[in-house]
Image (cartoon, rainbow, N blue to C red):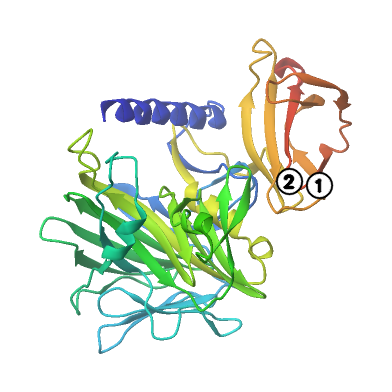
Amino acid sequence: MCHYEDIRSHGNTLLSAAAAALCAGEPGPEGLLIVNTLPWNRTEVLALPRPGGAHSLALVTVPSMGYAPAPTSLQPLLPQQPVFVVQETDGSVTLDNGIIRVRLDATGRLTSLVLVASGRETIAEGAVGNQFVLFDDVPLYWDAWDVMDYHLETRKPVLGQAGTLAVGTEGGVRGSAWFLLQISPNSRLSQEVVLDVGCPYVRFHTEVHWHEAHKFLKVEFPARVRSPQATYEIQFGHLQRPTHYNTSWDWARFEVWAHRWMDLSEHGFGLALLNDCKYGASVRGNVLSLSLLRAPKAPDATADMGRHEFTYALMPHKGSLQDAGVIRAAYSLNFPLLVLPTPGPAPSTSWSAFSVSSPAVVLETVKKAETSPQRHTLVLRLYEAHGSHVDCWLHTSLPVQEAVLCDLLERRDPAGYLPLRDARLKLTFSPFQVRSLLLVLQPPSTYTP
């Protein structure tokens, strides 16, 4: 763990240095800067630190790959509907932000998830979502590496006690409810279910104290969706896998991996399950399942024991996952807005370094060039995320002197020089194509913003 603490410490030092650089050495009292590392504009609810160690919730808007000053007062909610939170006499809680309506029973299970605009129910009739299940997990050979198909025969739902659900945040820009769940005599779970204003998905912030042996914890969501294929994100794209076990090779995929999201869609409607760090997944029939924790005992008898924190989210959507913005939503879940204290006054205006005109193209990476460390050269890596042919414009506010396509080793393409037009570059992509770009910047002495 000490290595991870070192990484966290060095990362925080770099963030502080970056915040200081953005303030340009202006004298005055400390301020707050909100940074968006993703290549699209974001309007989200954020907890801002206040004097005395308190925090206040605010709705903030930050431009693409840029920053904005922290608001000094709460932002108006119009035209967005505030979040309403209602606890019924039976202990259930309803959260509603005008986009989705979430209903939890008295134990924290999801009994209803409605896409408000269409009135479409997402949870299968007679079923519940956010159902934690425990399996026996005893592989034949490699304890920490193998997952055997026969573990599916040992499924045991983890049942909570009625009355454990309580309202957390009472509405406005955010509504939440939380509950405790005893997984076993040795392990317990606490979870806060959060719905923000204007947000198309509901988040499940989870903390688990895990002390088990050869057990496997998952969470399930039976969906009112029928499709023979489910879609899973992979690096720089996504692929489809069957939701049935018709063949032996289908059966071999009883658990598969996914990066930030998986999606089950039929014509006109679908349900996406997003996550921030859990990559074992499966969709069997209409049930989306996310693998959370295992408890192997070899080669390390204490592997995965202790306290865990993670978040997953559920996003019902109209139309295809591409048109509904599932990919962007999953990125936003994984890369929250950063609130950075500044050594001097924060900039008074917003600023954006890069943006892309098409939602199908993701600017995944901005880094310093390895091949030209002595020059002011950046490398950008973009990919087409929807599976389509697309033309787009890359906008930048940086003083670009030269732009040229390159390969993954940052070697220039002799035929890849791109004209810069009004601080824009035109790029063309085929489905799932990855493109790298070298940007040579003007020397600081010759640039006046």
Q: Is residue 449 visible?
A: no
Q: Using the image, tell me which numbered label, if any, was put on residue 356.
A: 2
Q: Using the image, tell me which numbered label, if any, was put on residue 392.
A: 1
Picture quadrant where residue 186 is located: bottom left
Front position in the image: 386 or 328: 386
Compared with residue 42, is residue 166 higher up or lower down, i.e. above or below?
below
Q: Are marks 2 and 1 in contact (CB under 8 Å)?
A: yes
Q: How many marks?
A: 2
Q: Amino acid at mark 2?
A: Val
Compared with residue 92, is residue 159 higher up or lower down, i.e. above or below?
above
- Residue 81 in the image, given as x and y percentages of width and height: 53, 76
Compared with residue 40, is residue 421 higher up or lower down, i.e. above or below?
above
Q: Residue at x 72, y 15 (%)?
A: 445
Q: Using the image, tell me which numbered label, if any, was put on residue 281.
A: none
- Secondary structure beneath dot 1 equals strand
Which of the image's four quarters has the N terminus? top left
Front position in the image: 250 or 17: 250
Lateral position of residue 182 relative to residue 18, left or right: left
